[in-house]
Amino acid sequence: MGRLFGTDGVRGVANRELTAELVLALGSAAARRLARGPGSRSVAVVGRDPRASGEMLEAAVIAGLTSEGVDVLRVGVLPTPAVAFLTAAYNADFGVMISASHNPMPDNGIKIFGPGGHKLDDDAEDRIEELLAQGSGERPVGAAIGRVRGARDALDRYLDHLATAASIRLDRLTVVVDCANGAASAAAPRAYTAAGARVIAINAEPDGLNINEDCGSTHMHQLQAAVVAHGADLGLAHDGDADRCLAVDAAGQVVDGDAIMTVLALGMQEGGELAANTLVTTIMSNLGLHLAMREAGIDVRTTGVGDRYVLEELRSGRYSLGGEQSGHIVMPAFGTTGDGVLTGLRLMARMAQTGSALAELTAPMKSVPQVLINVEVSDKASVAQAPAVRSAVAQAEAELGDTGRILLRPSGTEQIVRVMVEASDEETARQVADRVAKSVSAEG
């Protein structure tokens, strides 16, 4: 079996790859790695997104944790960043979030946060996998078995925390928020309303089956239409667990994570908040972001794909802003992980502060044509390394030269190989991407 943990926890089709038995064992292994040890009671915060399988997997992970003597604070349906925040706020030993983020409803996943709500490093995840393979040893009995209690103030605590990020009132802004029928459905409208914005919520009625279904940050068309129809100042789109935020300007144009980072970085630089005058982003960010930052005199630190690598760079360099094109934006002053609702608040605060429309604020970033093709394969690792695929990539690099770039990488959460090409014009980017994607598909 390959490595269980991907770039964002453990994921799979619920009740197929991600079974209740596996999740119970994973909870048990996590408890043995992260609990304080014999003689003391450890506490774990457990939350989930609203997908139906979360009910089953929540019960399984809680069974695994309590079987090892860990007490559980069950916070219910909340965004992933809320679980990270509450892990620290409740002084818990670790936290567990049950979610597959932007993935379709049949999928689910397990994300584990260490003390303080920080994502685990590779070594900690490897140790949990080792303990999982070993199986459980002698378990506690009687009063030593873990107990479960609900945390009724969990959402209110998280909303109070978000209020500290809204540095300016948003009373003159009208925002449409697409909650993806996910974990943001209660939190996001309340947070934006509390900050003073007029809020129009769409896709905010989760039923366990409709999460991410033709909505949210991976399907922006509903939000684009709603912003124009309501004459709103902007739209904000979250994913299933609300750790992402993408935007739409008043004209209905999509504003991606690169453009959002441009707005926030320039604002933080102006306010003296941009530590070391540096932005952290991944290799997937558009060349246009790099050019905009260069023009502003802002340094850019580049990491591998995945918000965990952005987080590691932020922590090691003590930087204050980082993120991904996909809308994971991290501001360590306010949270330990990407927080879509927080990002929305900060973006609107910049609009309110400057009195500028979102399109004006994003104008410094001019995207270089970029084409991304996701190719479904049976074995993403072997396909990505296939000689024919590597040859196609090398040929594309030679063709593009200094006028563009190509990036080929396996997805961290799905059996997909991503082909991304940037070029001076979209037609060239499309042709090169199509050619490389065909070589990937032929090996898949």
Image (cartoon, helix red, strand yellow):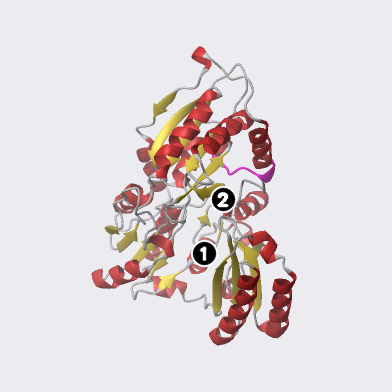
Say which of 106 and 124 sits in front. Answer: 106
- The percent position of residue 64, horizontal first and vertical second, equals 52, 30
Answer left or right for 331 relative to 74. right
Is residue 121 within the magenta segment? yes
Q: Quadrant of the C terminus?
A: bottom right
Mark number displayed over residue 8: 2
Which mark is nearer the camera, 2 or 1?
2
Q: Is residue 371 above or below residue 219?
A: below
Residue 104 spot, x, y in % from top left: 44, 56
Measured from the top left, where is residue 326 in percent x and y?
Answer: 51, 63
In the image, farthest residue toward the top: 142
Relative height, residue 311 to residue 25 (above, below): below
Query: Between residues 329 and 31, which one lies in front from this camera angle?
Result: 31
Whether 233 is drawn above or below 158: the answer is below
Dot 1: element: helix
- How far across and how far down the image is residue 196, in percent? 29, 54
The residue located at (60%, 74%) in the rendering is 437
- What span is colored magenta in the figure? 117-123
On residue 261, which mark appears? 1
Crowdedness of circle 2 by 10 Å Cα count: few (<14), some, many (20+)? some
Instruction: Tell me the distance, in whole angstroms, between the alpha carbons under discs 2 and 1.
Output: 21 Å
Tell me the number on the disc at residue 291. none
State yes or no: residue 114 in magenta: no
- Say few, some or many: other residues with alpha carbon within 10 Å of mark 1 (under 14 / 14 to 19 / 20 or more): many
Q: Residue at x 47, y 28 (%)?
A: 72
Residue at the extreme left of the image, as rendered: 230
